[in-house]
Image (cartoon, coloured by chain):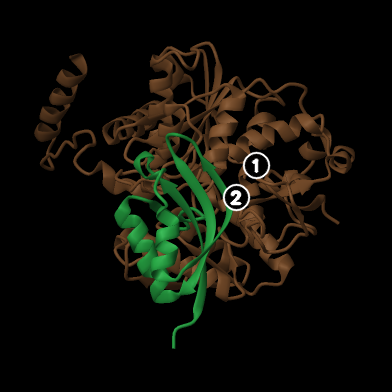
Chain colours: A brown, B green
Amino acid sequence: MGHVKGLKCRECGREYPIEPIYVCEFCFGPLEAVYDYAKIKRALSRKSIERRPKTLWRYKELLPIDGEPQVGLNSGFTPLVKAENLAKFLGVKELYIKDDTVAHPTLSFKDRVVAVALTKAKEFGFDTVACASTGNLAHAVSAHGAKSGFNRFIFIPATLEQSKILASIVYEPNLVAVDGNYDDVNRLCSEIANKYRWAFVNINIRPFYAEGSKTIGFEIVEQLGWEAPDSIVVPCASGSLLTKVWKALKEFKEIGIIKEVETKIYGAQATGCSPISTAFKQGTDVIRPVKPNTIAKSLAIGNPADGYYALQAVRESGGAIEDVSDEEIIDAIKLLARTEGIFAETAGGVTLATYIKLLKEGKIDKKDCTVLCITGNGLKTAEVLDGKTAEVYHIKPNLASFEEALQRIKNKEGK
Amino acid sequence: MSELKKLRVRLTFPQELIKEPVLFRMAKKFDVMPNIRRARVTDTFGEMILELEGLEENLEQGINSLREQGVVVELIEGDIIE
């Protein structure tokens, strides 16, 4: 038996049984999984966690499943890299990268949420899973769904670039390219999810799917020696990841795994799609939808479902939200690569660039122990660096030509 | 033959439309039935979560007319494409 009591509306508090539903019938508020923390407290301790395999399922009592994990048995527990070179460059005391660029199997944090969503889909008895995505989510559903034997329907906008399609179609899902703008695709998928008995991971399975993001928070605490850091910077698309990282810290406190949570949570957005950051800066809790225009496509959610709750989490923790330009994103991707040897996708650039901005604004203390959530691999969005990388030295196949290049390199380094 | 359809949406009203009976006019003109579940209105913004019921073409025309007036109409699920 699992440790989930049921689902509860985040707006009106009405309770529902554990079913593939996502919205309150009365107030249309989003539903969230509610746990029996007293029971979890008895079942889970630092020691029991430490004895388990190093995957996201080592925290299974705090995930919304009833039986044993069935999908993503190798996902999660990515490295927490102490970023000493980057810390030195930025003049900060203690900095870590939570490195989901090496998430198994599809190199983004979506492997976590999809592992949980598809395990739950198995428990519900679904034989078909689906999602609408332009990238990371499509890759994760395609791959995890292949391994766990689901029929898969992946919806993409017909204008999506070939390189992004390849990383999904290689797993041979039913890939459906919808001829229409983003609004049309959103609306069609909502209709399909309501008509067909499929597990649409981020629609009817969303209350379960979203909980998988908590594992980033759990892992950060465990990897820091069972301590919550002073600050965590989280990229915001729908806002779900940020709210769940915050929830993870509070849950660890609730069940006695850690004593205190004094962590400030910071949100990172691209200026070209910054509805949550805008609301934060305006001091309002109304998220005004925007039309995205940024290179950070994996964060380009103009109408974020959990934006309001992300704002609440940031304000409750005493953090802040900032946004950064496409140029700052590129610079940050390159900085992370040359200092720490980690190649992040554009969302990672957003997170690091936002951290740098928050440092400059004095909103994050240089003495803080800070963790940056780097959520996806740079090979997925390599095209954004076209023409913006360091110089390649082309030479003839002879020693003289090489030595000429070597001189140029030395001259450059001497500058 | 077109069927009755239900659509759950979030409307965001700009400041200049708060005093206007925008929803009532749309409902009457296009024969769309609004069923309001949640709303917040202040002097600077208005937000409403509701269900709209009507014939498919009427719903489409009604939503288009709201958008033309400056109301932001979005699915309550948020953006589904991630």
Residue marked by disc 1:
A215
Q: Quadrant of the N terminus of chain A?
A: bottom right
In this rendering, the answer to whether A187 lies above or below A315 is below
User: Are the residues flagged by discs 2 and 1 from a single subunit?
Assistant: yes
The answer to whether one can see residue A245 in this image is yes
Q: Amino acid at mark 2?
A: Arg
Residue A243: image x %, image y %? Answer: 59, 38
In this rendering, the answer to whether B16 lies above or below B66 is above
Q: Are marks 2 and 1 in contact (CB under 8 Å)?
A: yes
Q: Amino acid at mark 1?
A: Thr
Residue marked by disc 2:
A112
Q: Alpha-carbon distance for marks 2 and 1?
A: 8 Å
Query: Which residue is located at x 65 percent, y 53 percent?
Result: A207
Callout 1: SS: helix
**On the rendered structure, is A383 left or right of A16?**
left
Which chain is home to disc 1?
A: A
Displayed quadrant of residue A293: top left
